[in-house]
Amino acid sequence: MVLNFTVMSIASFLTIITLLVIYSILDIRDRKVKNEIVLIGGVVGCLILVLTEHFVHNTVLHLSALLLVVSISYILFRIGSIGGADAKVLFTIALMSPGIELGAWSQPVLEAIIGLGGELFVLLLGG
């Protein structure tokens, strides 16, 4: 198992970290993250994905991650485990960074499941 570090994956990671810091500050300060802020963050993240061609090279990984996160986040939101801002931010993160990228694996859906399972575990453990 070899992690795949490329300029594309590092740019995606740094974008995610920057957005999470901004969202965290807003959430702590105002106890609310506005939809406009999440939308702007998603647009900026998608723009970076397009410019670095990360989405083009990992389309199946991004779409499978998004499908998994949308379904799991919606269920967790409906039962009250996470808030609405958490669910929206998870959608954005799943689209921009589908989880771990392993260069030796040829099964992107399995990578998405493992990566997002870890992210959701950390989210729920920290909450």
Image (cartoon, rainbow, N blue to C red):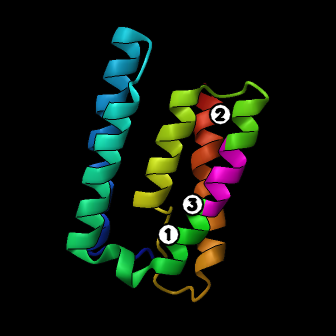
Check contact, mark 2 vs mark 1: CB within 8 A.
no
Q: What predominant SS class does the magenta segment belong to?
A: helix
Label 1, label 3: how far apart the Cα atoms are: 6 Å
The residue type indicated by label 2 comes to Leu
Check disc 3 and report its element: helix, strand or loop. Answer: helix
The image shows a total of numbered marks equal to 3
Q: Which residue is mark 3?
A: 66
- Magenta region: which residues? 67-73
Label 3, label 2: how far apart the Cα atoms are: 18 Å
Q: Where residue 23 appears, x then y in whole percent?
A: 35, 29
Check contact, mark 1 vs mark 3: CB within 8 A.
yes
Picture quarter with the C terminus: top right
Measured along the vertical axis of the image, is residue 38 above or below residue 57?
above
Disc number for residue 62? 1
Disc nearer the start of the sequence (3/2):
3
Check contact, mark 3 vs mark 2: CB within 8 A.
no
The residue type indicated by label 1 comes to His
Tell me if residue 109 is in the magenta stretch: no
